[in-house]
Amino acid sequence: MHTPPDVTALGHRYLGTYLLASPLFFGYFAADATFRAAGDTRTPFVLLLTSVAVTLVLDPVLILGLGPFPALGIAGAAVATVGVRSVAFAIGLTLLVRRGLVRVRLPSPATAWSIARIGLPPALTGVLFSLIYVALTRTTTRFGTPALAALGLGHRVESWLYMIGVGFGAAAAAIVGQNLGAGERARAMRAGWVITAYATLPALFGATLSLAMPERVAALFTPDAAVIAEAARYLRIVAVAQLFVCAELVLESAMGGAGDTIPPMVSSTVLTLLRVPLAAWAASHWGIVGIWWVLSLTAVGRGVAMMALWRAGRWQRKSV
């Protein structure tokens, strides 16, 4: 990513620990999705809430070496996350087996194909999205560490909205799938729009904060004046785009619940890929502000694309 040497060293120490446990993280996400698909959203919420609470305590203990624990620095944050999520996965899997929601055995070829057919397109979209941000980070690094920190801080601020979209999206997938199974296509269509509206309400609140007091929001994460100034500029530019993030996440999940994952993947992938050349071009003309505008406009484009696909109704003719 062409990051400065000090940032690279910190990233190496963190990721070197974090990636070792990536299979357990995938297991945790699968267990979380299984609970939600069965209509149980409380159990994964409790698991996540407990994990976050324990991690909040373990992070400073392992980073700073409080009490009898050694000071691990940035690696301590990775150790805390890895340990807590691994335990949460073990507890979640145990509960799933006891409730009869999971049977530990090799899947049949037909089941494996069904999982891959529906799951691979959004999975590949997520992988590509992450790889694109590697390229964007290289472009952003040209403008110094404050710009790079502002990009990461902006993502942290937006992550709460992303999680809201994912949560409402899980509800949309279940409701749309159930209604299509019952032959209620009109109700499924209406459910997608209604859930999108519910998810957009907190997005409106977030957009208002990003426009009205971006410096105060940024100051919650860092005391560095240069980072605060750049992050505030980022938040102002992407504020309107936040209104479309939940529409994208909810309707993409709703189409996934209908088994129609290819068109959302193609639409999202094309717009995400365009970020790389557009960001490089915009950065050469308008500096770091050009990158922020590219991120904002492509986010709006993805949301509009998902709304157009949902309205077109092709997903109503799919069969899971």
Image (spheres, rainbow, N blue to C red):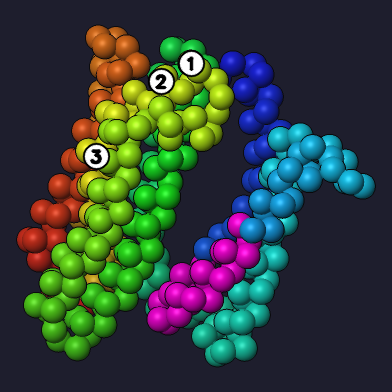
Q: Secondary structure at mark 2?
A: helix
State the separation of the CA atoms marked 2 and 3.
18 Å
Residue in the foreground of this view, choosing between 232 and 266: 232
Q: Secondary structure at mark 3?
A: loop
Q: Which mark is residue 226?
A: 1
Q: Is residue 275 above or below residue 303?
A: above
Q: Amino acid at mark 3?
A: Ala
Residue located beneath label 2 in the image: 230
Q: Is residue 81 above or below residue 257?
A: above
Residue at figure coordinates x 33%, y 64% from the top left: 168
Q: Is residue 41 magenta?
A: yes
Residue located beneath label 3 in the image: 241
Q: Is residue 186 above or below residue 14?
A: below
Q: Amino acid at mark 2?
A: Glu
Residue at figure coordinates x 46%, y 70% from the top left: 33
Mark 3 neighbour density, 10 Å: few (under 14) some (14–19) many (20 or more): many
Residue at figure coordinates x 38%, y 51% from the top left: 162
